[in-house]
Amino acid sequence: MKTPLLLAPHDVHLLWGVEHWVVSARRGAASRVENGKYAGWPFDKVVDAEGVAITGTKAADGKVFPLLMKIIDAKQSLSLQVHPDAVVAPMLGGEPKSEAWYVISARPEDAKIEDALTGTIMAGLKDDCEPEAFMRAVAEGTAADHVVQYRVVPGDMCYLPGGTVHAIGGGVKIFEVQETSETTYRLYDWNRKDDSGRPRELKVAHGISSINWRVKGTKLHRRAIGTPYFTMRELDLEGRFLRALDTASFRAYFVVEGELEVSCGGETVRAGENGAVVVPADADEFVIAGKAKVIVTTL
């Protein structure tokens, strides 16, 4: 496949805000293709049809798009939670999930409910946190006291391998790239109730089993971040540039601000703020143009 894919998001509305799955091939929750011969198709069906021509030879399974990319728009603080890694996930009947965040904005005034987490993120345990003390704190509702909190600004990036305890505060908007998985174990949810007046379900036992006790805090990066599963980098684009691919990996572009134009295989697509374009691994050469801040993701 030689032509770019402009994708429309699959939206997920949640108690704390909304997620826009801008690049998703999850069954029943896929992004929608907006252009070309596959216009109107869910992205997962296009991957079924084209396989490694889209995903690239570095993908573990060419018929499975390996990443999920989403905007997390937190109007309230997310639960304190953890995802299992590749070792623990099969034992718990879940899917492994490591992820990286790019902070789009951090505006406490955008939060519907202000609390101690508003405008910040939490990621990783404090250096002096021991398993027994943390488990007691979970039971007592004070687990957040043992997790490192960071005040973030637009452009901050961090990597959260599976097993990292974390949360996102209200008023923070994040672009997340993750392994294709939706396994989440909530440890604490701030004594919050759902629309029916019931506390949301916690998975404390699974969560405790998933924690990597060696992960102490995280590191905030700027401009680029590499992980064992993907690389993401911030690009300030101004002008018109020819790029080449070697069939190893697709290239995904997420527009933070401005407008992006992508041309290859005789077709051109344009994406504005919060838009996403996937350039298939088989595209060979392509042109990007415009004035925009974008996040580029590859395997």
Image: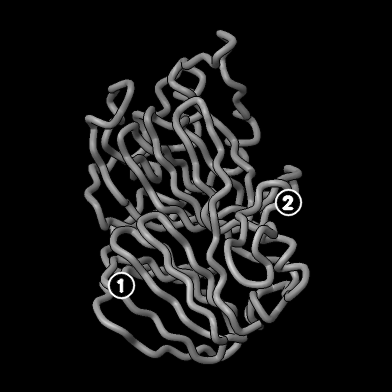
Q: Residue furthest top?
A: 197
Query: Is residue 200 shown left or right of residue 295?
Result: right
The residue that appears at 64% across and 30% down in the rendered structure is 205
CB of mark 2 within 8 Å of CB of mark 1? no
Cα separation between marks 2 and 1? 30 Å
The residue that appears at 58% across and 20% down in the rendered structure is 200
Residue 77 drawn above or below residue 199 = below
For the C terminus, the image quarter is bottom right
Q: Secondary structure at mark 1?
A: strand
The residue that appears at 45% across and 71% down in the rendered structure is 231
Image mark for residue 193: none
Query: Is residue 266 shown left or right of residue 141?
Result: right
Q: Where is residue 4 drawn, in percent x and y?
A: 55, 75
Q: Where is residue 213 drawn, in percent x and y?
A: 49, 46
Label 1 neighbourhood size at 10 Å, few (<14), some (14-19), many (20+)? some
Query: Is residue 140 shown left or right of residue 182?
Result: left
* Residue type highlighted by circle 1: Leu
Image mark for residue 27: 2
Mark 2 or 1 closer to N-term? 2
* Residue type highlighted by circle 2: Arg
Residue 74 drawn above or below residue 71 = above
Q: Secondary structure at mark 2?
A: loop
Residue 64 drawn above or below residue 12 = below
The residue that appears at 64% across and 75% down in the rendered structure is 55
Q: Where is residue 104 drawn, in percent x and y?
A: 31, 51
For the N terminus, the image quarter is bottom right
Q: Which residue is mark 1?
A: 235
